Image (cartoon, grey):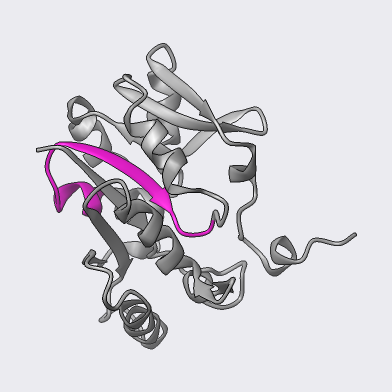
Amino acid sequence: MGVTAIVLAAGASRRFGSPKQLFAVGGEALVRRAARSALAVAPTIVVIPDMTSSFVALTTSIAIRESLAGLGVKIVENPEAAEGMASSIRVGVQACEGDVLITVCDQPHVTSSHLAALITAGATISATSYDGTLGVPAFFSASFRQELLELQGDRGAKALLERHADVVRAIPLSAAAIDFDKPSDVNPPQ
C-alpha cells in the first residue's frame, strides 16, 4: 500500500482575505508548491473546496485545479470544508489506503527532503517540531487510520499527536513555523 501524501487545500482563507492556496511565492502558487514537494516523495492527493458549496468555493476550486495542471496529483473535493481541517483530513484518508503524510499548502518552506525525513523516521507517527510544538507536516502509519477518520472540527490531527505523544518522533524544521494565515505573515512588520 505504501504512503500517500495528503495536501490540505480546502480552507476558506478567511483571515488571509483571498484564497491563500493561490498566493504565489517565487512565481508559484502555494498549493502547487506544496503538491510538487509532496509528489517528490509519494503519490499525492490534494483536498480542495467542494465546487457546489458556494460561488467562492467554485472559483477557488477551478483556480486550484488549473494551478495543479500537469502535476499528476489526485484531486478530491471536500463537501464539508466549512467544518474545518479535520473534515479535509477525513476526505483525504478516505481516498487512499495505507500510511499517510499530511501536509498543508501555507507553509512555504517545507521541502521534499523534510517530507522524506518524516516518512523514513521509522516511527508510527512522526511530526514536524517548530516553535516548541509538534504539528504538520506529519506522518501517520495505517494503524492510526480509524483515529484520523474520527477527527472533528478545526484542530486537524493535533489531538492525535497529543494523545500519542509517547510514540511521536519529532523531526525539527524551524522554518515550518512560517505559515501564511493572514496578509501580515507574508510581509511581517520590521
Magenta includes 140? no
Tell me: residue 100, above or below residue 62: above
Furthest-top residue in this view: 166
Residue 35 figure quarter? bottom left
**Vertical comparison of 130 with 190: above or below:** above
Q: Residue at x 14, y 48 (%)?
A: 96
Residue 55 appears left or right of 106:
left
- Looking at the picture, how far across and down is residue 79, in whole percent? 25, 67
Is residue 105 highlighted in magenta? yes
Where in the figure is residue 65, as x and y percent of width and height? 30, 78
Judge whether residue 185 can be spotted in this image. yes
Range shown magenta: 90-106
Report whether residue 153 is seen: no
Q: Is the residue 110 above or below the residue 98 in the image?
A: below
Q: Residue at x 24, y 52 (%)?
A: 92
Residue drawn at the location 42% of the way across and 31% of the way down: 159
Q: 79 or 174: nearer the eye?
A: 174
187 relative to 142 in the view: left or right: right
Question: Where residue 69 sits: x, y (%)?
Answer: 29, 78
Place residue 88 in its image quadrant.
Answer: bottom left
- What residue lies at 59% left-to-right and 30% top-to-bottom? 133
